Amino acid sequence: MPTPDESRNDAAPDHAGVAFHPPLMLGLLLAVGLGLRALVPARFLPDSLAGIGGPVTVVVALAIFLWAVRTMRAGGASIPTNEPTDVIVQTGPYRFSRNPIYLAMVLLLVGVGVWANSLWLVGLAVLDAILLSWGVIAREEAYLQRKFAAHYAAYTDKVRRWL
């Protein structure tokens, strides 16, 4: 288990300082998307494709989410963004993506959008990815770079941000 870099600034809070809580953003975007769908439907797929593709995407999103959470817990890492991180987990889905939980959240929006046959929700999934990249991931990466320095840099060299 890596130890934090001793040269980091101890006056800085020991968390990422994200701009928003990702599950709250997911809930807000789902509500907005479903509301827009009710007001102005924007269908984009044949019903048969939406009825198959949507549930499959939702199941994949949930499977990635559960795998990532289980891996984080097994590795002794904290999940909430407002808590300190003491370890960089590099097993399970973290071998393929540095952010599988956020990937699962975006995929969930896409899956619900496909299932509901709503271009609004799919578009909001794109917005979610942009907001997560700016308001959460960039801040988490800066925090992890300060805290774990070379160890985190080596991990980012091996594993992509999303996929």
Image: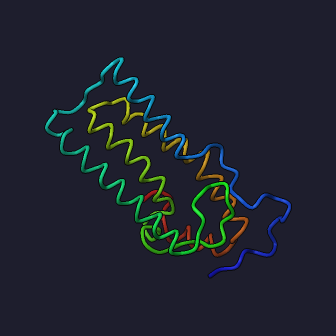
Outermost residue toward the left in this view: 48
Outermost residue toward the right in this view: 11
The one of 107 and 160 positioned closer to us in this rendering: 107
Quarter location, residue 92: bottom left
Q: Where is residue 19 in the image (x, y as percent from the top left)?
A: 65, 43
**How was the colour assigned to the protein in this rendering?**
rainbow
40 relative to 67, above or below: above
Q: Where is residue 54 in the image (x, y as percent from the top left)?
A: 26, 43
The tally of labels here is: 0
Outermost residue toward the bottom in this view: 1
Residue 129 falls left or right of residue 19: left
Quarter location, residue 9: bottom right
**Quadrant occupied by the N terminus:** bottom right
Residue 100 falls left or right of residue 16: left
**Quadrant occupied by the C terminus:** bottom left
At a point 66% along the width and 64% down the height, the residue shown is 144
At a point 44% along the width and 53% down the height, the residue shown is 103
117 relative to 71, above or below: above
Outermost residue toward the top in this view: 39
At a point 37% along the width and 46% down the height, the residue shown is 108
Q: Position of residue 49 (x, y in %)?
A: 17, 40
The one of 127 and 1 positioned closer to us in this rendering: 1
Quarter location, residue 145: bottom right
